Image: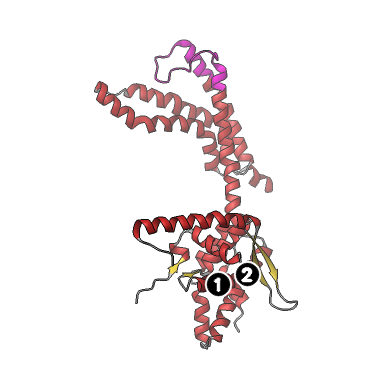
Amino acid sequence: MPDWRAIARKKLGPLGLDAKRQEEIVLELAGHLEDLYSDALSQGRSHAEALHSAFDAASDWNELRREIQLAANEEVCMNHRVKTLWLPGACTIALSGMVLRLLQNPSAPVPHVLGPWHSTELVIYCWWLVSLPVIGAIGAYWSWHSGGRFLERALAVSLPALGMVCLPLLMFPFVLGYDLIRFHSFPFVPMAILLFGWGVLPEAALLVGGLPFLRGQSGQVAASH
Amino acid sequence: MKDHTINIGAQVKRGSAELAILSVLSDGPLHGYEISKRIERQSRGLLRFNLASLYPLLYRMEKRGWVSGNWEGPAGGRQRRYYRLGPAGKRRLVPLREEWGQLFQALHTLAGVTHA
């Protein structure tokens, strides 16, 4: 009788799980292979045919290893992404929106996004821009502290500006079509101002604030060393 | 001769595999090999699990609380991991059956596809 446990352990390789769980999985898979082998023998097949039958059930051990790892880390991944990206990102979006609204006179309308801007609106905008590095730092620190990788930290910081950029870009084909049909022209300059003023500049301000936490290892990795 | 066997891992969505496993476990606890044999037998050989399609799915379902696995066996004898349907799995089985019933009904109406 082949040593199914040794075979399963060797074929599966390290799963990156704790030793007890890894051994349980090896034992379970080895049992399955042994059952296949024994069943084939009991059906009158030769030793070689029975072995072949058992190995047929797990022809791709790399896929099996990958699938088990994915299954084992599914929940962890989801929690990790929520903690390192979505929560800090939601925080930066909420804070940037709240600060903008607080800077305005609550009874006043929201500043025009395509201009022309009055001096009051410009002052509000500038103050908002000044506040963004602080907000970026908060988002980046949160993600860094939760163990976020560089991309997660950068995205958590950038979400408010990305939202500001994506929305006009999504609207772009419709605005383009409408303006071309109605006015036979397109407001390229106001659109460029919109993208620059509400996308590029806020993005730069947020990243400047988040910069100290974007570099190097995540907080959890650093703490473990 | 053309092979009409459906390879669950590759061709049928995970939902159908979950339904198959939950269904056989609704009759009582089984270990992994028994689950695969029971499904193969009850589907008249149409549905087959291999190691890569069965165990990762069982581990996922266990993580969600649909099934629970426990090592059982005679003292000094071979231990096997038996899976039982948990309360969450029982709750999941009802809508899964309905959804797949509706899907087959829709396919039947659309293209004359019937249950196996």
Q: Residue visible at 44% across and 23% down?
A: A197
Q: Chain of mark 1?
A: B
State the image quarter where residue B113 is shown.
bottom left
Q: Which residue in the structure is indicated by mark 2?
A: B30
Is B36 in front, or is A21?
Answer: B36
Is B33 in front, or is B88?
Answer: B88
Q: Are marks 1 and 2 in contact (CB under 8 Å)?
A: yes
Question: Is A106 positioned to the left or the right of B106 in the image?
Answer: right
Q: Is residue A169 above or below residue A221?
A: above
Quadrant where the N terminus of chain A lies? bottom right
The residue positioned farthest toward the top in the image shown: A119
Magenta residues, as a range? A99-127
Amino acid type at circle 1 is Arg
Q: Is residue B8 above or below residue A203?
A: below
Disc 2: CA contacts within 10 A as few (<14), some (14-19) or many (>=20): many
Amino acid type at circle 2 is Leu
State the image quarter where residue A95 is shown.
top right
- Residue B65 included in the magenta stretch of the image: no
**One can see residue A163 in this view:** yes
Q: Residue B38 — which label?
A: 1
Is A170 in front, or is A149?
Answer: A170
Q: Chain of mark 2?
A: B
Q: Position of residue A36 (x, y in %)?
A: 55, 78
Q: Position of residue B24 (x, y in %)?
A: 57, 67
**One can see residue A209 in this view:** no
Q: Is residue B19 above or below residue A26?
A: above
